[in-house]
Image (cartoon, rainbow, N blue to C red):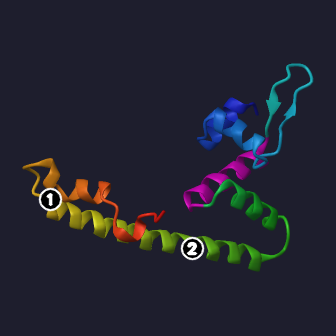
Amino acid sequence: MKIGQLSRATGLPIDTIRYYESQGVLPRAERQATSGYRVYDDADVERLQFVRRAKALGFTLVEIRELMAMTEGDDVAAVRQAALAKLVDVEQRLQDLGLIRDGLKSLVEACPGSGAMAACPIVHALTDNPPSSRKHD
């Protein structure tokens, strides 16, 4: 199949497929001798579906390449460990986002939404340097 057909089969834009090739996530396609078109097969569709699903779970392209290499072997424990590490990372980011949410919520609740800009707690939080973050010369 040609790249347009691969794009339709996977739901990925052609530019993304080319990018994945350049990043080594998808092997460089063979070219037809007569036309020079890249030729893809069902294994490429499966590989790109793997990439899409892994990206949806938060894996980076580097991590996806590592996962793909693991699937070529016989080490299920390594795949599990990679997924566990990603889960720990996601849980930490969720905790961080919760703190950000709580801080924003407090600022929004403290802001009257009218009056002088100088009295706005949101503006103060964005412009004031707390003592612990000031650099000492």
State the image coordinates of residue 14 (x, y, percent, origin top left). 65, 33
Q: Which residue is mark 1?
A: 111
Q: Amino acid at mark 1?
A: Cys
Q: Which mark is residue 31?
A: none
Classed neighbour count for the residue bearing mark 2: other residues with Cα under 10 Å, few (<14), some (14–19), many (≥20)? some
Secondary structure of residue under mark 1: loop
Q: On the rendered structure, is 77 left or right of 36?
A: left
Residue assigned mark 2: 87
Q: Residue furthest bottom?
A: 77
Q: Quadrant of residue 106?
A: bottom left
Question: What amino acid does circle 2 point to?
Answer: Leu
Q: Position of residue 79 (x, y in %)?
A: 72, 73
Say whether residue 119 is magenta: no
Q: Which residues are magenta?
A: 41-58
**Quadrant of residue 101 in the image?**
bottom left
The residue nearer to you, when weighing 77 against 9, is 77
Depth check, mark 1 against mark 2: the one in front is 1
Mark with earlier residue (1, 2): 2
